[in-house]
Image (spheres, rainbow, N blue to C red):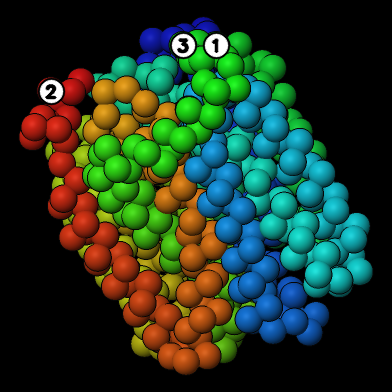
Amino acid sequence: MSIVQSPSALGKIGIPPHLFWGYVGVLIFMMGDGLEIGWLSPFLVEEGFTVQQTSMLFSAYGLTIALSSWFSGVFVEAFGPKRTMFAGFILYVLATIGFITLGISQMNYSMMLAFYALRGFGYPLFAYSFLVWVTYRTPANDLGKAVGWFWFVFTGGLNVLGAYFSVWSINTLGYIGTLWTALLWVSIGAIFALIINRDVLVRKSDASAKGKAKELLKGLTIVKREPKVALGGVVRMINTTSQFAFPVFLPLYLASYGIPTSSWLTIWGAIFLSNIVFNLVAGFIGDKIGWQNTIIWFGGVGAGVTTLLLFYAPQLFDGNLIVITIIGMLWGASLSAYVPLSALVPSLVKGDKGAAMSILNLGAGLPVFVGPAIVGLFIGLVGDVGVMWILALLHFASSIITKFITLPDKISEQEIA
């Protein structure tokens, strides 16, 4: 009997069996979305654009991702997950076509900026809406593992399969050809998540326009009713700020130590191969030793230390690829230790989990804007070393903030389950 046909087998490893094909769809969709992350900045610099221009491009992209990430949770409440995910798919396809044909093919910076920003509305509506779906359809005692699997497929597609496919595709199809293949992958992912996945999430929401507007407002009012949800959003933002800052300047920094873009893509893929494995480990550890402890020590402290090591390693070890890759993999593992946030934050509220997840999803989307923005604002003032220290200090700060994200009335994760 195959694993797909055996709900008990899927359940034992933490995947909700009724959502299996949704997980597969997110994996493939995010592979298409992640094709250019590792090489777009150095490619544009080689074409004559400045680091500041590429950081602005990524910042505009990140701003719309942040907005879309917030919308995803409340849109699921108002319109349902499949409609929201389908809207994300359509936006992604249309914006990608515009970005390629009117923007990057003609090296028209204004068009690139406009369509890349529009493209940012796509994947959060698709992927993060599915995460909300998971939180509603998974028992609390299995939620840490279920969200761990979500981040496994999300990151595995975005930063591992996307990076490794690009290594082959760039040599075979070229940069523009590689971008066109994204449409194929996201379409396949949408078929799995929206058609082959037959699970249904039934929400008792007001179908009127007034009712839907009320659901959307909950994505803002919840931070007033439960400030700890807002703290969770801040920690989630810090979680991956360095992840989205690095591609803007780190390939150029490593190149000064003799590491070309092709090697950087291999390192980037290895980093997130480690990350997706530890996304699962973090989910299990969080369910065992506590979500808060996992985030504080393995996440904030671990990511802060390894961020600094990743910067100083090329200097100390003369650009040794093996050493840099190992340190990078440790950094990737530390980012995964924030995974229990996706179980902790919705557990802060009894109802309106979609609204709580909207704040968390906003925190997940903001780094795509904040990371490049930090590079653009500070690299001219404090250089590569200053930017790395800023990113490391943010991780350390996240550990302190997490200390204040406690469950209602000191209830433990085990008692919630």
Residue 280 visible here = no
State left or right for residue 318 relative to residue 316.
right
Whether 12 is drawn above or below 149: the answer is above
Q: Residue 390 appears at what percent x and percent y?
A: 36, 77
Residue name at image x 16 percent, y 35 percent: 407
Residue name at image x 74 percent, y 73 percent: 43
Which quarter shows the C terminus?
top left
Q: CA distance from mark 3 to mark 2?
A: 26 Å
Between marks 1 and 3 in the image, the one whose residue lies nearer the viewer: 3
Kind of residue sitting beneath label 1:
Val
Kind of residue sitting beneath label 3:
Lys
Residue name at image x 24 percent, y 33 percent: 348
Whether 61 is drawn above or below 42: the answer is above
Q: Residue 399 appears in which quarter of the rendering?
A: bottom left
Q: Secondary structure at mark 2?
A: helix
Task: From the image, tell me which residue sits under label 2.
Answer: 415
- Density class for disc 1 (Cα within 10 Å; few <14, some 14-19, many ≥20) is few
Q: Secondary structure at mark 3?
A: loop
Task: From the image, tell me which residue sits under label 3.
Answer: 204
Task: From the image, tell me which residue sits under label 1.
Answer: 200
Q: Residue 303 appears in which quarter of the rendering?
A: bottom left
Kind of residue sitting beneath label 2:
Glu
Q: CA distance from mark 1 to mark 3?
A: 13 Å
Q: Residue 99 appears at what percent x and percent y?
A: 82, 57
Q: Secondary structure at mark 1?
A: loop
State left or right for residue 267 relative to residue 281.
right
Whether 224 is drawn above or below 87: the answer is below
Residue 382 visible here = yes
